[in-house]
Image (cartoon, rainbow, N blue to C red):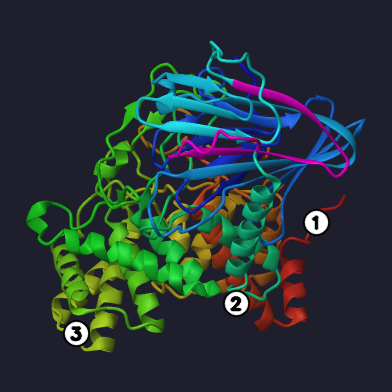
Amino acid sequence: MADYPPIADHGLIGDLQTSALVSLNGTIDWFCSPRFDSPSIFGSILDAEKGGHFTLTVADESAVIKQLYMADTAVLTTRYLTESGVAEVLDFMPIDEPETATDMHRILRIARVMRGEVKFKMECAPAFDYGRKGHHLTLADHHALFVSEDIELSLHTSAMLDHSEGKELTDGTARQEFTLKQGEVSGVLLATGQKGSTAGALPASQIRAHLESTVRYWRKWVSRSNYRGRWREVVNRSALTLKLMTYAPTGALVAAPTTSLPEEMGGERNWDYRYTWVRDGSFSLDALMQLGYTDEAVAFLFWLGQRVLEHHTAEDGFPMNLMYRIDGSSDLVEEIIPDWEGYAGSSPVRVGNGASEQLQLDIYGEALDAVYRIGQHNKLLGHDAWMGISRIVTWLADNWDQPDEGIWEVRGGQQNFVYSRLMCWVAFDRAIRMARDRGFPAQQLRWRQARDAIYYQIMEKGYNEEIGAFTMYYGTEMLDASLLKMPLVGFIAPRDPRWLSTLDVMGREIVSDSLVFRYNPEDTDDGLAGGEGTFSLCTFWYVDALAKAGRVGEARMVFEQMLTYSNHLGLYSEEVGPTGEQLGNFPQAFTHLALISAAVTLNDALDETEDTETLSDLSEGILQLDIT
């Protein structure tokens, strides 16, 4: 089996319609075009031999490598410290009119030497449509054209490409080697959707113009953030990451820009996250609103509103799907790429997502909570949207009291999940509030009766007196980290005795070194073999819950410890493995939006807490050491 870089050894670049992963060794090993959910062009992160790659690195294999983002931008810098000099490669995707969908996307890679003299090597080896379609390669001095059945890829360079005049390379790969001295610059521009000019070398003026405009775009965007708290750099990086995963033409946010990165090495828990979950997008709206990014929140709200209006009657099935493609379509049939070995042998490689057909009742609560929150700031809700919401809530009044697959999309059968009931309660509560605040017509009596019935049912059946905690579903002792949302959505007071007891039980049973498992997979029949890591999203929810429960010092310690589990760029995948490795699709939007919310909540709690109280909280918890 070929070597695979750790999942964490990657940075993300993008142009708000698609994105690419760049590894520490200078390889772009994941890139889809023209959209996040399009077939891959480079996919060696999922099959090192067949997936295709685009490498620009130094020839010295003993080089010390560092990677960072240019401050307040999505321009990735990979620095190489070699025996002959210091060099770096800048990677980014220029942004022109991101709100207009296009097939034209560009990756610009700039090599430059800061000290001494350094030799570089470049290799561009696409594998179109997950390696299922071949291509035809034509080479010139400074240009390579890769032509496949449905797409063309154009490579335009500053330095000469290696080729034999008038011939094609039999392996369909373009290569070059070049040496730069201190102060010298060379560029490689890869473009989809256009052939590009074949005359002459890539001009330095074009390289400079693209870099300047891209840096300007990102720094202008970051400057809109109103966060001035203790973790500004961390929060801004998470906000930038969420922006990179947003499809600007529709405002939809993908759960992650990748598919099939494993939740367990060698296991089968590999999923395609390149779609928009109603749940994730709704939570992201709240996170962006907290930072002042109202334009992004409004754009997603509009996308969500279109999905509501598409489902006019309950006769068509569920009022909403739990996930969609970024353009709003729902063709997410799951298939397996049969010949790919998967990341480090973790097969299968999946395209599409079969969970799209599941019943997950919690999505209505998350969606209506998002609509309610943004409505408090901006009265955007019109008549048609309210009629759509009313139909959803009326359908929910007839359907909330049934088993479903739950937030974690388990494939082991439906249950009466407490979290699903909780978010149904939120749906009714927020709909009632919107009708009251705006004077909208509504079946308020019916909605109130449903809301109150859910409340009593959760308190009677969802709380297990024997273990002193709310549980995953009725009649079990299994815990569920999604219930950390209970005080965060206002269902229960954050210092209610039942909740404080639940928090303590969770701390003992599903928390490890401040990291939180979403549940214990060994005790939970989720329909899949193997285990998984801790869920980074849940750890940040834990911080939120601790802070609201008054355990501010402990919350801060958990938050600070969790920051040490990010990669070198401040990015998180879905999970953290047993030895601290990143697992699952990368980077994951859910984790970064939860980080933002936790940082805001914790910062506010620290501002309100006296230093003596914080120290007391710490001394009662983390600082109590059994020293013998």
Q: Amino acid at mark 3?
A: Phe
Circle 2 residue: 226
Question: Measured from the top left, where is residue 408 in percent x and y?
Answer: 39, 46
Please tell me which residue lies in front, 391 or 92: 92
Q: Nearer the viewer, mark 1 or mark 3?
A: 3
Q: Secondary structure at mark 3?
A: loop
Q: Residues within 10 Å of mark 1 (few under 14, many from 20)?
A: few
> Is residue 316 shown in magenta?
no
Percent x, y of residue 305: 27, 66
Magenta residues (range): 174-201
Q: Is residue 417 left or right of residue 198?
A: left
Q: Name, please, the residue furthest toward the front.
A: 199
Q: Earlier in the sequence, mark 1 or mark 3?
A: 3
Q: Is residue 379 above or below residue 458?
A: below
Question: At 45% from the left edge and 50% from the top edge, which residue is drawn?
Answer: 17
Image point 66% across, 58% down: which residue? 212
Cα gap from disc 2 to disc 3, whole angstroms: 32 Å
User: Can you identify the residue that label 1 sits on?
Assistant: 625
The circle drawn on residue 440 is 3
